[in-house]
Image (cartoon, grey):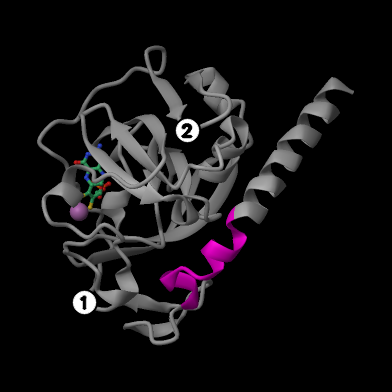
Amino acid sequence: MEEADKLKRVVEARMKLKSRFEEKMRNTPSVADNRPMGTGKPNRHGMPVLPVGQTITKKWPVLDLGVQPDISLSEWRLIVDGAVEHPLVLTWNDFMALPQTDDTSDFHCVTTWSRLDMPWRGVRFMDLAALVMPKDTATHIMCYGYDDYTTNVALEEALKPDVLLGHTVDGIPLPKEHGGPVRMITPQLYAWKGAKWINRVEFLEGNRLGFWEERGYSNTAYPWRNDRYS
Ligand SMILES: Nc1nc2c(c(=O)[nH]1)N[C@H]1C(S)=C(S)[C@@H](COP(=O)(O)O)O[C@H]1N2
Ligand SMILES: [Mo]
């Protein structure tokens, strides 16, 4: 009974949050652009499978700021705070007890490679957001990595169903060099919007720029608009 109540509350919170952002999400370029730039058949959100200027790679290059932090599962924490009703700090066990999602998605790096059909397992950002419940004034998030990397994402992008905090990829625990134990992925935006070694998600009342955004990368990062630099 208690479990059923809990589930009901989670579902209700998710529905409420979804309805708040549904229209904004429907109008984002990676869903609504009627002249997307790219080649190939439409993907599941209606965009050409390969965005303009990208080349498919089978390998998975590693990009970082020169540090690959080593975070054991026992010391790993995820802080979720800022403009939310119920801020929280999750341990690894708390995180793994959240609803888990499997999803196969594409990965588009601004340095022009794309890796298609990557099978991920993790927690939907939407499910995490429903737990903390963003305040009505929240518009963006800032994601922080253990390496002090930061990147900002608009909520209508972060709440899309393919945005995961992934811990497993290709059937194995996410390798450290790719951001393990947990990283975010943003399949409908360039991949720098997904923080590796994620440690904190701060909900913001208004926009703020992250590490690369401050250094001339696009605030919005839409692959099908060649929206790389600002
Ligand atoms: N914490 C952290 N996250 C990060 C980065 C980083 O340097 N630190 N690099 C970003 C960039 S620029 C890209 S393209 C992707 C690369 O992910 P990969 O190394 O798994 O290919 O991670 C993004 N997330
Ligand atoms: Mo990148």
Q: Is residue 120 above or below residue 202?
A: below
Q: Residue 202 placed where, x, y %?
A: 39, 33
Q: Quadrant of ligand 2?
A: bottom left
Is 24 within the magenta?
Answer: yes
Residue ID at (61%, 60%):
22
Q: Earlier in the sequence, mark 1 or mark 2?
A: 1
**How far from the left and from the top, in percent, is residue 195?**
31, 41
Single out the mark in the foreground, 1 or 2. 2
Where is 27 relative to 6, above or below?
below
- Which kind of residue does numbered mark 2 sit on? Ala
Quadrant into which the N terminus falls: top right
> Is residue 177 visible in this depiction of the protein?
yes
Type of amino acid under label 1: Gly
Q: Looking at the image, which residue is at 30% across and 38% down?
A: 196
147 with respect to 28 (left or right)? left
Specify the quadrant of the image occupied by residue 71. top left
What kind of secondary structure does the magenta stretch mostly adopt?
helix
Residue that badge 1 annotates: 53
Q: Nearer the viewer, residue 124 or 174?
A: 124
Horizontal and vertical percent position of residue 8: 80, 35
> What residue is drawn where x is 56% and y is 54%?
161
Residue farthest along the top direction in this orientation: 74
Along the line of sight, the residue nearer the viewer: 221 or 172: 221
In this view, which residue lies farthest toward the right?
1
Query: Secondary structure under badge 1?
Result: loop
* Residue displayed at 40% across by 18% down: 73
Residue 23: percent from the left, percent from the top? Answer: 59, 65
Q: Quadrant of the C terminus?
A: bottom left
Which residue, given by chain and number where applicable, does mark 2 sit on?
83
Q: Which residues are magenta?
A: 21-32
**From what the image shows, is residue 4 above or below residue 226?**
above
Q: Secondary structure at mark 2?
A: loop
